[in-house]
Image (cartoon, grey):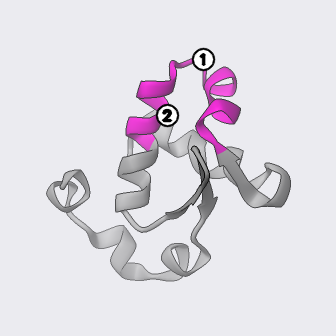
């Protein structure tokens, strides 16, 4: 989670309409390409801080408030997140 891009994701998504965003909403803000942003979102989701919802061909990411409140989410090892 210490990666600067991953640290930027939560505030960007929290301030988005309905507290959710798709990759295409985040690429310009972060100045990164879609595959890179998707990779970072996958890691943050694996850490339990985001939840994903598929809508047709789109996937929307939203802050998982339960995950943010859970001390376990902060104690997961990097190996757990990369699986």
Q: Is residue 48 above or below residue 57?
A: below
Res 78 quadrant in image: bottom left
Residue at point 34% right, 79% down?
72
Between 8 and 58, the one nearer to me in the picture: 58
Q: Which residue is mark 1?
A: 31
Side of 22 relative to 34 (left or right):
right
Observer-side mark, 1 or 2, equals: 1
Q: Crowding at label 2, few (<14), some or many (≥20) Cα neighbours within 10 Å?
A: some
Q: Is residue 32 above or below residue 2?
A: above
Between 63 and 61, the one nearer to me in the picture: 61
Residue at point 68% right, 21% down?
28
Res 24 quadrant in image: top right
Q: Is residue 9 above or below residue 71?
A: above
Side of 41 relative to 22 (left or right):
left
Residue span colored magenta: 22-40
Residue 82 colored in magenta in the image? no
Residue at point 82% right, 60% down?
18
Res 54 quadrant in image: bottom right
Q: Which residue is mark 2?
A: 5
């Amino acid at each position: 989670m210490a990666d600067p891009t991953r640290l930027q994701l939560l505030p960007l998504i929290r301030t988005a309409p309905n507290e959710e965003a798709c990759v295409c909403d985040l690429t310009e803000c972060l100045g990164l390409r879609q595959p890179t942003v998707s990779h970072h979102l996958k890691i943050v989701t694996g850490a339990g801080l985001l939840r994903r919802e598929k809508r047709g061909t789109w996937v929307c990411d939203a802050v998982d408030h339960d995950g943010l409140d859970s001390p376990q989410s902060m104690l997961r090892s990097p190996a757990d997140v990369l699986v």
